[in-house]
Image (tube, helix red, strand yellow):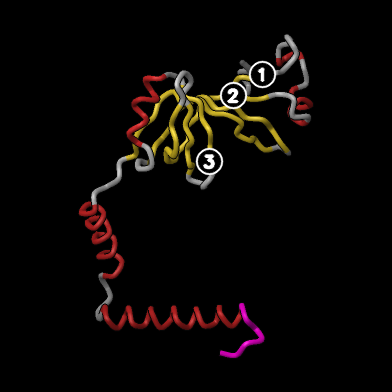
């Protein structure tokens, strides 16, 4: 483990300690991987495997991440979250550096937490409080929102003209 990076550095084909080599050259040549504990947020889309459990997680960026699961107990606990719950998955990630950017090459799930979704009534209460503060000074809400809709229609019309310059509306 290299203390400067606070992560594990795997260098294929060598017994050399990272402090004895030029790590920057290895990174630029994509000859080493970095592993560190981190978390991923997303939705469980698939879980399976008889002996070695795997999971497919749709992350919040819309990318599918295939993950190993550290043990079958974690896999069994994770299964009821299929398709529904937003999850925070904790585990060990493996990265390679490509063009100076870390690219996720693997993730092993060690634990997870379900992100609770607030109830509809709680959401409405929070929104009501927010809107009350925001629109407290509006004397005539109907006129205000009519004006807002008019502005939106004007903006939509201008956008349409900009997208179709040869066509008159």
The residue sitting at the front extreme is 50
Badge 1 is on which residue?
Answer: 10
Residue 76 part of the magenta segment: no
Q: Earlier in the sequence, mark 3 or mark 2?
A: 2
Mark 1 crowd level (few <14, some 14–19, many ≥20, 10 Å Cα): some
Q: Give me the residue at 26% from left, 78% from top.
A: 141
Q: Quadrant of residue 162?
A: bottom right
Q: Nearer the viewer, residue 166 or 75?
A: 75
First in sequence, mark 1 or 2: give its number: 1
Q: Position of residue 36 (x, y in %)?
A: 55, 24
**The C terminus: image quadrant:** bottom right
The stretch of residues the image draws in magenta is 163-169
Q: CA distance from mark 1 to mark 3?
A: 25 Å
Residue closer to the observer: 41 or 74: 74
Residue drawn at the location 32% of the way across and 78% of the way down: 145
**Pointer 1 or 3: first along the chain:** 1
20 left or right, relative to 48 = right
Foreground: disc 1 or disc 3: 3
Viewer-closest of 158 and 110: 110
Badge 1 marks a residue whose secondary structure is strand
- Give residue 111's mark: none
- Dot 2 corresponds to which residue? 35
- Rendered-image quadrant of the N terminus: top right
- At which x and y percent is residue 14? 75, 12
Which of pointers 3 and 2 indicates the residue nearer the eye? Answer: 3
Residue that mark 3 sits on: 64
- Check disc 2 and report its element: helix, strand or loop: strand
């Amino acid at each position: 483990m290299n203390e400067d990076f606070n992560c594990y550095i795997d260098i294929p084909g060598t017994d050399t300690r990272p402090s004895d080599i030029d790590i920057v050259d290895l990174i630029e040549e994509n000859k080493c991987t970095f592993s560190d504990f981190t978390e991923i947020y997303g939705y469980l889309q698939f879980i399976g495997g008889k002996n070695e459990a795997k999971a497919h997680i749709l992350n919040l960026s819309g990318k599918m991440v295939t993950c190993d699961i550290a043990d079958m107990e974690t896999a069994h606990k994770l299964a009821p979250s299929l398709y529904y719950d937003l999850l925070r998955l904790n585990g060990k990630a493996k990265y390679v550096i490509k063009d100076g950017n870390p690219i996720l090459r693997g993730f092993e799930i060690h634990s997870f937490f379900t992100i609770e979704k607030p109830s509809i009534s709680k959401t409405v209460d929070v929104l009501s409080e927010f809107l009350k503060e925001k629109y407290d000074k509006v004397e005539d809400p109907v006129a205000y929102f009519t004006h807002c809709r008019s502005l939106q229609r004007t903006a939509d019309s201008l956008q349409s003209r900009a997208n179709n310059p040869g066509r008159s509306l």
